[in-house]
Image (cartoon, rainbow, N blue to C red):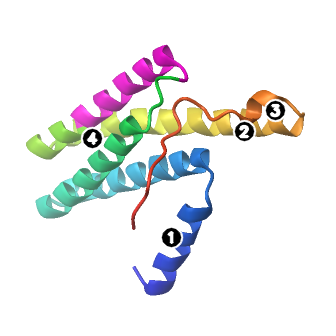
Amino acid sequence: MTDKTSAYLKTQILTARPEQLTLMLFDAALRFAGKARQSLQEKNYEGSFEALARAEQIVIELLNGLRPEADPELCRRQASLYLFVYSRLVEANMTRKIEPLDDAARVLGTLRETWLLLMEKLQAEGAAGDDSASARPAVTPAVSVQG
């Protein structure tokens, strides 16, 4: 990564709203899952290990960012999904098999799309003047993303 790219990414992260950070985390996890899949297909096990480890770290960040005080039941369900994804990533890393990785990527993709729909809904409600749009969602991580 060049210095300019790194500086741009740092600016994006520092100026992003919490819900945008969550979307960035989903995107990064999916990107690393894709790299891991390609590395596994090429039998580049060092590359797959590194990419899977990064994806695992991102899922842990998402899990740690849950705010159960806002909605305990929603956070419990979200945590279950994150733990499933994490366990499949770990299994893919240990067994060097693509199937568990594909399971994790499928769930991450669904979570990302759902998150994007939620962001659009909150934006629409905010444009309509609904005060509930200003509330921070229970599943928005308060993370410090480091390049």
Whether the residues at callouts 1 and 4 have beta carbons within 8 Å, the answer is no
Please, what secondary structure does the residue beneath circle 3 have?
A: helix
The dot on residue 125 is 3
- What residue would you read off at disc 1? 10
Instruction: Give the mark nearer the N terminus: 2 vs 3.
Output: 2
Amino acid of disc 1:
Lys
The image quadrant that residue 3 belongs to is: bottom left
Looking at the image, residue 108 lies above or below residue 47: above
- Give the camera-side residue of 80 and 52: 80
* Magenta segment boundaries in residue numbering: 70-88
Task: Name the front one of labels 2 and 3.
Answer: 3
* Real-space CA distance between mark 3 and mark 4, rounded to the nearest whole angstrom: 36 Å
Instruction: Judge the density around disc 2: few (<14), some (14-19), many (≥20) Cα neighbours within 10 Å.
Output: few
- What residue would you read off at disc 2? 120
Amino acid of disc 4:
Leu
Looking at the image, residue 60 lies above or below residue 70: below
Please, what secondary structure does the residue beneath circle 2 have?
A: helix
Task: Name the front one of labels 1 and 2.
Answer: 1
Instruction: Give the mark nearer the N terminus: 4 vs 2.
Output: 4
What residue is shown at x 51% (from left), y 53% (from top)? 24
- Residue 81 appears in the figure: yes
Task: Name the front one of labels 1 and 4.
Answer: 1
- Give the camera-side residue of 92 and 6: 6
- Residue 96 appears in the figure: no
Give percent across and percent down for residue 28: 43, 54
The dot on residue 101 is 4
